[in-house]
Image (tube, grey):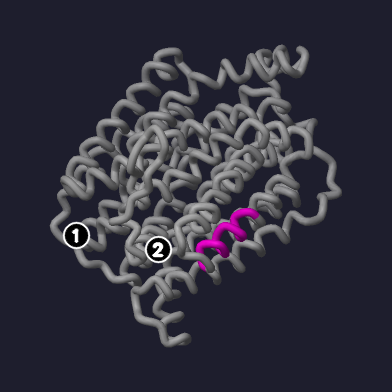
Amino acid sequence: MRNLSRPARRYLLHTALLTFGLATSSLFFNLLLVDLGYDERTVTVPLIGELPLLGLLNSLPVLVAGLSSLPLWWLVSRVGPRPALVAGAILHALSLLGVAIWTAPLPLLASVALSGPATVLFQVSAAPFMMRHSGPRERDLLFSLSAGLNIGVAGVGSLVGGLMPGLAATLFQLPPQSAAAYRATFAAAAALTALAALPLLWPANVRRRTQNVEHSPAVVARSTGPPLRSVLRSTLYALRFMVSPLLISCGAALLIPFLNIYFRERFGAPDAALGVIFAAIGVATGAATLVAPVLSRRLGKMGSVVLTQGLAIPCLLLLGAAPALWVAGAVALVRAALMNMAAPLYDAYAMEHTPEPSRPVVIGLINGAFSVGYIIGPTISSQVQRAYGFGPLFVATAGFYACAALANVLIFLRRGAR
């Protein structure tokens, strides 16, 4: 931490506050929708037909994020990553506040949709901000700290969030495990998320550490060309980085957003138990992420990604067959840690091979690929849950994860990429 610049430390505080605020409420989003009856309600979409509202409310933020990505990428390239991070935090807070206030379909859909561009602003700004304020010696540390802090703080937020509905029920005389208690939790989360803008509200009066930034011959060659040509070349280069995230998102979207419902329906887990489970998952995953630089030194960046992805697949299948809540929670912890611990290495490798003006576009494409599956995946998942339960979803998700690991082997490891 001492080797990190002041802007980098402020960024870590920003992302910790943002993650904490979002985590305190995200655990109960689908449970709130179920309590409001949205798991049984449908909406008619022109040219498509009836869609379950539970799936649509999970898919809408990703759809809006995709539609707003191009103008937001352009905006970030003009205003810089710091103002974009501040704007993203404010939009996230407004989205949470809307969910707390409204329960009718249209205003609820509008509130949920705000989280789409808010997420895009963070995704396309975080990595360029970290690259701008770090040198080659501390870059892996900063990326790993950021990912580990996000996941670890999310775990702490889940633990606190698991207690908040019960606290709200006691303070305001609300029924426990009710929509009213969950809405109070969202209101508190909105206030916490708004605080994340504070560390970045003033510009950092420090010199950029350009003397420490690595430039490979390929990066230098691309960065000296015209800006548009550089962006186009970097976009084409980024396509190979999008294959694995796309496959992972197609699998994750079927299952991961609904794990809280799975634990509730299969094992009858109460709110506090859900908070403990997801807190343990977050803390363990955050700690495991800090091991990523050690793996990178031994196996290379891509070798570490493939190894951890491969080990996570049998854990996913075991999670679907777990006989008790404590077993399922332990397996879910190991699976999440393995699947996410090397993710910052993936981003760092892509950023190192991209010229700075194009980094928002490239990281946006990678994160966009991670999100594509969520456009339709939750809708498909909600229909499968109603007809067949969770069993087919575990198998399908494991299949997509296996394809993602294989794609990384074929694209990167066979070429000797480290």
Which residue in the protein does label 1 denote? 266
Is 226 placed left or right of 289 in the picture? right
* Element on which disc 2 rests: loop
The amino acid marked with disc number 2 is Phe
Whether residue 37 is situated above or below residue 309 in the rendered picture = below
Given residues 131 and 265, the one toward you in this image is 265
| Count of numbered circles on the image | 2
Mark 2 crowdedness (10 Å alpha carbons): few <14, some 14-19, many ≥20: many
Given residues 289 and 247, the one toward you in this image is 247
Give x and y (percent) for residue 107.
53, 58
* Element on which disc 1 rests: helix
Mark 1 crowdedness (10 Å alpha carbons): few <14, some 14-19, many ≥20: some
Give x and y (percent) for residue 285.
41, 51
Note whether residue 231 is visible: yes
Give x and y (percent) for residue 8.
70, 48
Q: CA distance from mark 1 to mark 2?
A: 17 Å
Q: Which region shows up in magenta?
A: 91-100
Which residue in the protein does label 2 denote? 28
Label number found at residue 337: none
Given residues 233 and 313, the one toward you in this image is 233
